[in-house]
Amino acid sequence: MTYLMCIFMVGLVLGVVVVASNPSPYFGALGLVVVAGMGCGILVGHGAPFLSLILFLIYLGGMLVVFAYSAALAAEPYPEALGSRSVAVNGVGYLVCVVVGAWFFSGEWFGGLWEVVDEVADFSVVRADGGGVAVLYSSGGLLLVLAGWALLIALFVVLEVCRGLSRGTLRAV
């Protein structure tokens, strides 16, 4: 299990480096999908499979919308790939920063991070992620409705910003 979690964490860091170093929205969206998958794998490893599934589905649905708009607005015939010189230089620079930061902050602070949430309590009847969802819908119902309205308003704001001065769906940039 430790090796699998290490693979998920390395994949998460590499996905973030791909997102940060790539100017093309096509490969950036691919990196974001990798980051979402690896992050949800880490959540499953720590004992939250339901939360991981919900986050993955919601995140990929939002990514589909963002990718469609960014691909439509930045329709370039020859996007910069992951192997191009500028992207590779940026990626190596970010990886060096990650390695130096990991070396600088290394120590004994990570000892309890490999425990699953259900193993903290001895004889737990309710799983942590199912109990959290129940509390979200019972006590946090108003917050859930406000968050939904905020996301709807954010969607309209993004649509208005992307539309610009033209009145069509797609516009030449």
Image (cartoon, rainbow, N blue to C red):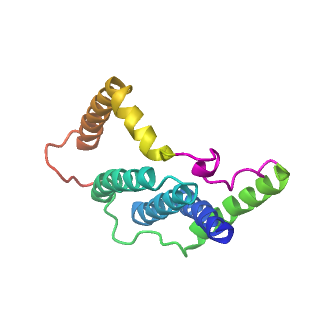
Q: Nearer the viewer, residue 111 or 127?
A: 127
Residue 16: percent from the left, percent from the top? Answer: 57, 58
Residue drawn 35% across the image and 56% down it: 60
**165 vs 45: above or below:** above
Residue 164: percent from the left, percent from the top? Answer: 25, 40
Residue that extends furthest to the bottom in the rendered view of this protein: 83
**142 vs 60: above or below:** above
Q: Quadrant of residue 85?
A: bottom right
Residue 58: percent from the left, percent from the top? Answer: 34, 50
Residue drawn 45% across the image and 39% down it: 132
Q: Nearer the viewer, residue 84 or 27?
A: 27
Q: Quadrant of residue 3?
A: bottom right
Residue that extends furthest to the left in the rendered view of this protein: 167
**13 vs 82: above or below:** above
Residue drawn 29% across the image and 28% down it: 145
Give the position of the N terminus as an image quadrant: bottom right
Quick check: 10 left or right of 80? right
Q: Main secondary structure of the magenta part?
A: loop
- Report the label total: 0
Quick check: 120 left or right of 15? right
Magenta highlight on residue 23: no
Q: Nearer the viewer, residue 2 or 32?
A: 2
Residue drawn 37% across the image and 51% down it: 54
Quick check: 4 left or right of 82? right
Residue 94: percent from the left, percent from the top? Answer: 67, 59
First to last magenta residue range? 109-124
